[in-house]
Each structure stands twice: as C-alpha cells, then as structure tokens.
Amino acid sequence: MLYYVIRRLGIAIPVLLGITILNFIIINLAPGNPAELLLDPNTSQAMIDAKKERLGLDQPFYIQYWIWLVSLLQGNMGYSYSSFAPVSQLISERIGPTLLLTFVSLIVSIMISIPIGIFSAVKRNSRWDYIITGLAFVGTSLPQFFLGLALIYWFALKLQWLPTGGIEPLEGGDLTQRVIHMILPVTVLSVAIIGKKVRYVRASMLDVLKQDYLQTARAKGLSGYIVIYRHALRNALIPIITVFGMEVPLLLGGSVIVEQVFQWPGIGQLTIQSVLSRDYPVIMGLNLVAALIVLIVNLFTDLLYRWVDPRVQYE
C-alpha cells in the first residue's frame, strides 16, 4: 500500500502542474486587466502601463507563469494585487472556516442519507419509498441561494431563532455560538447532497439485496438488522464511497454561493473578491489549494476501498 500511495503522490505532481497551466491560461484569456481595475478610471494610459510593468503583466503569459511557478517552488505563492498581502496568508486565514463548513456538511449528509437510502431500498415501492424519493428530488432541485435566503427569512428574521450569518472565531470562540452559526449554512449545503445521495444509496442497496447470499443469510435465521447492516451495506459501500468522494469538489464549489449568502468568511468569499478584481496571484493560489484538497480526498477515498473490501488489491 505504501508503494501505491507514493505512486499516487508522484502522479499528482504532473496533474497539479497541468491544472495550474490550464488555470493560468483561462485567467489570462478573461477580459479586463488588473492594472486598469486597480487604478482610477481617469488614470492616464502611461500610469496604467507603468502599473502593468510593476506587476509583471507586460510580459507574455508563459513568462508570467514561469515566474509564478518558480516563486511557488521557493515557497512563495505571490502577493495580492489589491491588498499587497501574501497569498499564503490570505488563504490560511480563510481555509479553516471553509474546510469546517465543507466537512461538517459532508458528515451530516453521510449520517442522514445512508440510513434513509437503506430504508427506502428495504421499503421499495412502499408509501415511505415514494415520499423519500419525492423529497430527494425536491432537495436536489432547490437552488442553494434560494434555500439559503428562505431559511434566513424564516429562522433568522421571522422566528429569530438563528443568526443571519457570520461565524465565531475558530480559536477562542464560544463553541455553542459557533455551532448555532453553522446550522443554516450546513443545512443548505447538506440538503442538496442528501437529495442526490439518497438515490445513489437506494440504487446500490437494491442491487445488493438481490444477491443470493443475503437470501442464505436470512434462511439461516439472522435478523434483518444484521443482514442489512453487516452483510448488505458493506458490499454496497464501494460505489457509495465513490460518489461521496466525488462530492467534495462540488461542496467546495457550492460553498462559494453559501458563504456569500451567509457572510461566511471562507475562501468562497475570497474567490469572488479575487475574480472580480482580477487578482491573479490569489486566484492561482486558491485554485492550487482546491486542487490539492480534491487530490488528497480522492487518494483517501481509494484507500477506503481496501478498508471496506479486503479483496481490493493495490498494485
């Protein structure tokens, strides 16, 4: 397994390199110039050109990319065009709230969608199955910004049970208040995942429940709980782990909208601010961190396969 992990990490290097090249090309193809956005609209062309030269934007894009890559290899992710702060500092200040929001939402969705999906499969074509299927479609169809605004209206403004947004400091803050601030954004992110994953879990369990060995287990007198959770669920977990692993990039993308709606100080807000101001170093840094998180989660997902099914071999 160690050789497999090392090989996967080795493969990740060219993948990351390709992602950064692609991102850099896309960013440079986008209309607008950071130097023009940073200066007053009435600034002369000479001052704009001087600003471009100072930021290195007068160089061909492949030279700019090479300068960025060399700085990155030396441990420097660059400096923000707008705030002049180190990119690594900006990201490190925001990554904690986003990871907290993302992974709590993922855990909540796993804890809810797997039991409900199993129940729906066991009660196939029953009234409960139809109700769960209908609610899953509703959850999947609801736009995150709409659900977020609706929850703010009812639970924050009308009932005044929960805050409209923000977060307690991650260090030294009140844990209870922090949890209260997380309820609405976690709910919004989890609803869409639960809606989709209930369907996946149901379909995966239905395939396993048809297998002969489960009929044999029932014939031996094993209880329904043991047959489902000890024998059926374990064999249905591999496709379920796969789809949950694939959900992490979507969660990171969805957090951009949720963080705006709930004023959550994570990398989603930083991403929008950086894109609007064409802050290239920050955008590149954010893309690199997001790609790293996705690659690590994919590797962790592959390792989980072996834990779930010992027959899986890593060669």
Image (spheres, grey):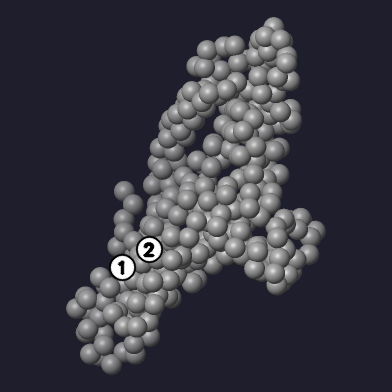
- Identity of the residue drawn at 71% across and 37% down: 89
- Identity of the residue drawn at 71% across and 28% down: 82
User: Disc 2 or 1, which lies upstream in sequence?
Assistant: 1
Instruction: Name the one closer to the observer, 165 or 123.
Output: 165
Distance (Cα) linking label 2 and label 1: 7 Å
In the rendered image, the residue lying farthest to the top is 46
Answer whether residue 114 is visible to the viewer in this image: no
- The part of the image, by quadrant, that contains residue 208 is bottom left
What residue sits right under mark 1 in the picture? 204
Residue 25 falls left or right of residue 308: right
Where is residue 10? Give x, y as percent. Answer: 43, 37
Is 166 situated above or below 134? above
| Mark 2 element type | helix
Where is residue 180? Give x, y as percent. Answer: 70, 67
In the rendered image, the residue lying farthest to the bottom is 221
| Mark 1 element type | helix
Q: Amino acid at mark 1?
A: Ser
Where is residue 61? Give x, y as percent. Answer: 52, 17
Instruction: Name the one closer to the observer, 48 or 229.
Output: 48
Q: Which mark is residue 240?
A: 2
Q: Residues within 10 Å of mark 1 (few under 14, many from 20)?
A: many
Is 78 situated above or below 251? above
Q: Amino acid at mark 2?
A: Ile
Q: Residues within 10 Å of mark 2 (few under 14, many from 20)?
A: many
Q: Pointers 2 and 1 in contact (CB under 8 A)?
A: yes
Answer whether residue 144 is visible to the viewer in this image: yes
Is 86 situated above or below 149? above
- Identity of the residue drawn at 37% across and 72% down: 133
- The part of the image, by quadrant, that contains residue 197 is bottom left
Where is residue 224? Give x, y as percent. Answer: 34, 87
